[in-house]
Amino acid sequence: MRYILLFPLAIYAAFAQEDRPLSLSGGFQLGSPLNDPSSRSSLFSSYTQVRWTGGPKVEFHLIHGFSLEFDALYRNYRTNSSYSFQLAPDVNAHAVSNFTKANVWDFPLLLKKRFTVGSLRPFLSAGFQWSGERSASSFVYR
């Protein structure tokens, strides 16, 4: 019987080491890539991405500086490609243009470890990301 009380006391002692163990926080995340996303463009195509990515986030703080973070990040982009081809030497060339607009949702799940270095709080994170993309394309033949 006395060992039954030992388990809850051990759990309490483990969680009492943190100032806010097992807390939940949420918010909104907004960011922009450091590199230029239009670098995907080539001679026959152009790639245009909206500069901002953002969405809601939830973070579950665990013990010893660990936490689980889940985000739902939205971004969109457009592509425009065109090329021409000729079916025979004596036939006029045909031009084909493709316009695509895509909406992308990214869902990363991260395990984070926070450190305290003076007044700074750097962290390491690792995880997995699911992505869902919905796009609409249109072709123009001339």
Image (cartoon, helix red, strand yellow):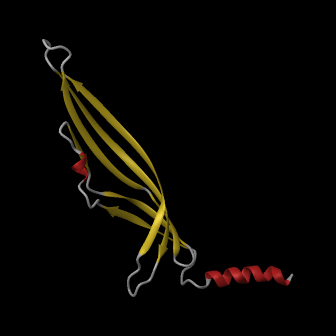
Residue drawn where x is 33% and y is 57% of the image: 53
Residue drawn where x is 35% and y is 58% of the image: 54
How far across and down, in percent of the image, does residue 86 sit? 18, 19
The residue most toward the front is 89
Up-down: is 137 above or below 76?
above
| Quadrant hosting residue 52 | bottom left
Q: Quadrant of the C terminus?
A: top left
How far across and down, in percent of the image, does residue 137 sit? 31, 33
The residue most toward the right is 1
Horizontal placement of 75 versus 5: left or right?
Answer: left
How far across and down, in percent of the image, does residue 111 sit? 51, 66
Horizontal placement of 116 versus 76: left or right?
Answer: right
Q: Nearer the viewer, residue 26 or 21?
A: 21
Horizontal placement of 136 versus 16: left or right?
Answer: left
Count of marks placed on residues: 0
The residue most toward the bottom is 118
Residue drawn where x is 47% and y is 76% of the image: 114
Up-down: is 97 above or below 15?
above
| Quadrant hosting residue 8 | bottom right
Up-down: is 76 above or below 72?
above
Q: Quadrant of the N terminus?
A: bottom right
Residue drawn where x is 29% and y is 46% of the image: 77
Up-down: is 19 above or below 24?
below
| Quadrant hosting residue 98 | top left
How far across and down, in percent of the image, does residue 141 sit? 22, 23
